[in-house]
Amino acid sequence: MSPDIEQKIRRSFAAQAMMTTLGARLVALSDGATVIEAPILPGSRQQHGFGHAGLTFAIGDSAAGYAALSLMPDGAEVLTTEMKINLLAPAQGERLIARGRVIKPGRRLVIVQADVYALQDGVETHIALLTGTMIPI
């Protein structure tokens, strides 16, 4: 990945108020793949004390979107056009880890996937699988 693309993605991530609100961090970035982590904060929990599905979806969608953006030409951006989530287990632990990747790049559509894991006591549990489509703009 070129330093210019990496810098563009890091600036874009830093400008996302939602990611800031959630305490999310972009921790890894490569061609067609990203990793975003977020703590399970008190304000991100649902009524049973688990991390809310909205937190899971938000970081999974962003991880997949930035994976797509990493393969776009300079000056391009991407938007999510469709995203499906399968919730596999409760989000229990200290933090969530979303690993996004491009399944099939394209000029008009980019097919993406993200796996989200909950980290508790050093053990990762796969809690969600997202699949979706990004459109370059």
Image: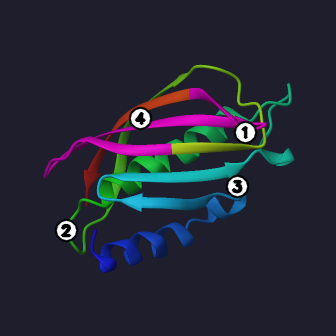
The answer to which quarter of the image holds residue 104 is top left
Q: What residue type is labelled 3?
A: Leu
Which disc, if any, is residue 22? 3
Residue identifier under label 2: 73
Label 3: which secondary element: helix
**Residue 131: image x %, image y %?**
38, 32
Q: Which amino acid does label 2 sit on?
A: Pro
Quadrant of the image containing the N terminus:
bottom left
Residue identifier under label 1: 122
Relative side of 49 to 66, left or right: right
| Image: magenta residue range | 99-127
Counting residues from the start of the chain, the first of labels 1 and 3 encountered is: 3
Which callout, 1 or 4, points to the residue nearer the camera?
1
Bin the neighbour count of mark 4 within 10 Å (Cα to Cα): few under 14, some 14-19, many 20 and up: some
Instruction: State the CA–CA distance, disc 2 to disc 1.
Output: 38 Å
Q: Decide if residue 15 is in sight here.
A: no
Image color mode? rainbow
- Whether residue 124 appears in magenta in the rendering, the answer is yes
Q: Residue at x 61, y 38 (%)?
A: 56
